[in-house]
Image (cartoon, rainbow, N blue to C red):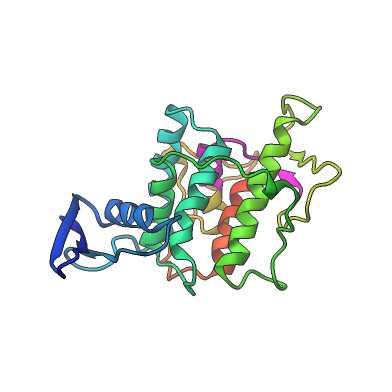
Amino acid sequence: MWDLMRQDDNGNRVRVASHGTRISALAQLMTFESGVPHRQTYWLDGPGGPVLSTNRDLYLHVLKIGRDARAASWSLSAFLRTLWKTSTALRGRDSVELDEVAALFSAAGSNPPPPYDPGWTTKNLTISGAAPSCYEDWENVLLSQIADLEDFLTDPRGARQDPTVLAPRPAGTGARSTPLRWRNFDPASYVECAVAGSLGGWRVQDGGRVPAAGSTLTESPVRNVAAFDWVELSRLIVCGQTFD
């Protein structure tokens, strides 16, 4: 059992909520700490350390999140806007552990999304250097995707029939830091491709991935995954957009 704790005005430890897993507790912790000034300190009390350690652990975790989001009829834009809001709890960090990545996606699929900010359409969303090096760079990658999805809503091409389409980015669009190419337009395919493309860990029997025609692969190798830096976290969400 994991307890989410806080300190009251008298300095006493107060239990806010109890969770059956560390990841669900982390998801609530991030939700509380996101989007508002940190006037209150929260922490977790529970047994042991991290729960997830491999690419397969994360793959199976996000596969369920994607399926739940699909059953709840979440749009990808709503899912990513909630992912963005929750991620603000990670601002200032140099790296993010695997359990926290899992918790970030859990929170994205279980909290109401913030509204789209029209300013994102025209904002310069490029990164600060050759590769993402901080939270703000990763944030611009994610906001680039959210802005593309908003553009698709008024795309005169209408329904997407081809497996790959290019983001419209009409006149007046701000510079963005993601590829034009899009392949995945719902949370289930996005999160599955995010982990499968960047880390692997899938098996055909999981039901989330079909090997390419002529391929004899039925699974990808399982390997340990250390903490993610912002380059790796950016690769994760770009694969969600572009990986097949």
Q: Is residue 196 above or below residue 43?
A: above
Q: Nearer the viewer, residue 117 or 225?
A: 117
Q: Which residues are magenta?
A: 180-193
Q: Is residue 147 above or below residue 162?
A: below
Asked if residue 108 shows in the view, the reply is yes
Is 188 a magenta residue? yes
Q: Nearer the viewer, residue 111 or 115?
A: 115
Whole-percent x, y for residue 196 in the image: 53, 51
Whole-percent x, y for residue 94 in the image: 49, 75
Whole-percent x, y for residue 119 in the image: 69, 48
Q: Is residue 73 above or below residue 55?
A: above
Q: Quadrant of residue 90?
A: bottom left
The residue drawn where x is 51% and y is 59% is 199
Q: Quadrant of residue 133?
A: bottom right
| Left or right of 207, for residue 42 | left
Q: Is residue 202 above or below residue 132?
A: above
Q: Given the current orientation, which residue lies at the most extreme right position?
A: 171
Total marks drawn? Answer: 0
The residue drawn where x is 38% and y is 40% is 110
The residue drawn where x is 84% and y is 46% is 172
Classify the position of the C terminus by image quarter.
Answer: top right
Q: Nearer the viewer, residue 8 or 243?
A: 8
Classify the position of the N terminus by image quarter.
Answer: bottom left
Asked if residue 243 shows in the view, the reply is no
Whole-percent x, y for residue 224 in the image: 40, 67
Is 222 a magenta residue? no
| Left or right of 123, for residue 105 | left
